[in-house]
Amino acid sequence: MHLSTKPPPWFWVAAVLFLLWNGMGVWAYIADATITAEALKAMPDAARELRLARPAWATAAFAIGVFGGVAGCLLLLLRNRLALPVLVLSLIGVVVQMTHAFLIADSYAVYGPGGLAMPSMVLAGSLFLVWFARRARMRGWLR
């Protein structure tokens, strides 16, 4: 079976869409990292306490997840084989962040079932990107 080294059009569409998705994650990280005292005061008490109790390593995992996702998607668009390890690192950041949020801090108790939607999409997107980069690498689309 001959595999083309030229990616199909859907490769570019997926890479751009996931770059935009991860760009929104970077925006969310920056908003979280630069939150004002007034914005914190406006939060419900339980959410504010959860946010203030978050350890630095969980915040670092958030940064690794989103900035790694952007870098990995840019590497996909550049057809660089480093996209795969960078996206694996991003996935590790997401898993560490979610582990803290749901197993250590019990965000579920604060946000309820509705609070699972976005984290579930983030995890699914990160898993997809690792699969996607691996497939692209195996098909010769990345150099």
Image: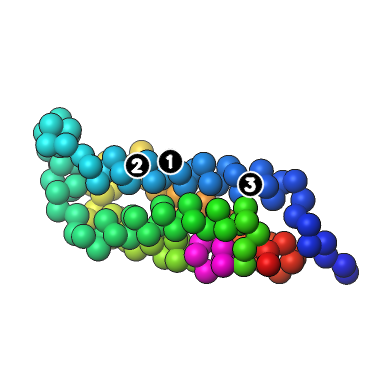
Q: Secondary structure at mark 2?
A: helix
Mark-to-mark CA distance, 1 and 3 = 15 Å
Q: Amino acid at mark 3?
A: Ala
Mark 2 closeness class: few <14, some 14–19, many ≥20 residues within 10 Å: some
The quadrant where residue 28 appears: top left
Do the residues bearing badges 3 and 2 touch, measured as CB atoms within 8 Å?
A: no
Magenta stretch, residue numbers? 82-87
Query: Three-letter amino acid code at disc 2?
Result: Ala
C-alpha distance separating marks 3 and 2: 21 Å
Percent position (x, y) of residue 46? Answer: 15, 41
Circle 2 residue = 28
- Marking on residue 24: 1
Q: Main secondary structure of the magenta part?
A: helix
Quadrant of the rendered structure where residue 16 is? top right
Q: Disc 1 residue type?
A: Met
Q: Residues within 10 Å of mark 1 (few under 14, many from 20)?
A: some
Which residue is found at the position 56% from the left and 67% from the top? 82
